Image: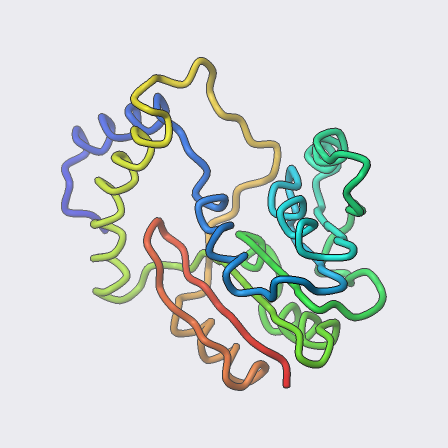
Amino acid sequence: MTILPPRVLRALERFNATYPWDHNAHYHRWILRQVPGRFDRALDIGSGSGDLARLLAGRATAVHGVDADAGITAQARRLTPPELDVTYTVADASAGLPAGTYDVITCVAALHHLPCTEALTRFRRHLAPGGTLIVVGLCRAHTLVDHLLGTVAIPANAATGWLKNKGRPSPRPVSMTAPVRPAEMTFDEIARTAGEILPGARLRRRLFWRYTLVWHRP
């Protein structure tokens, strides 16, 4: 639902294509503020081209990135300097996660591709005592608050793209190899599920069609 007419939406789509930016990477600095200054092992689920995994490697002894897309995982390996202890695995996280426990588990724009209950249960199982789970996810707009945030995000999205590109059009379109899947669960449904599996988890609606979840395992 939007209050903007189709003609305005089409113009915004053209503007956003000219000044693209990464909505998920926008939250990487926020993610780093949620984790300790130093920790042992980290797991990044839906690691994509490895941007977050490489940032975590500045804090962690070792980082393991998991993504179902072989092409983008190959790109992550090429972009990761050999001096960083980052391992990438091509795998479907719904089928399981790398063995062991992790002090930090991150999952950015990937949870809506997985069965929510099973995924959160698996994340809890692989999180070490005292560890931190951080999710930046997508949910289906349902309430008035959701739609209002979505409407506010439209001009904010255009302004942020223009600023991040320093007012210069992108020389080439941004392409994605990973499949795009719309979110099916609402924020309230995700919050109820998380409350059952991760008692005390903190969830917040965010701008740019995202929500965040932070849980510290006792």
Residue shown at the point (75%, 34%) measured from the top left:
81
> Quick one: which residue is furthest to the right in this view?
99
Residue 158 placed where, x, y %?
A: 27, 34
Residue 213 placed where, x, y %?
A: 49, 68
Q: Name the quadrant of the C terminus.
A: bottom right
Residue 209 placed where, x, y %?
A: 36, 52
Name above or below for residue 101 compared with residue 162: below
In the depicted view, which residue is nearer to us: 168 or 58?
58
Name above or below for residue 170 compared with residue 163: above
> Quick one: which residue is furthest to the top in this view?
171
When asked about the image quadrant of residue 108, the answer is bottom right
Colour basis: rainbow
In the depicted view, which residue is nearer to us: 40 or 26?
40
Residue 22 placed where, x, y %?
A: 46, 38
Residue shown at the point (61%, 59%) measured from the top left:
106
Residue shown at the point (70%, 65%) measured from the top left:
39
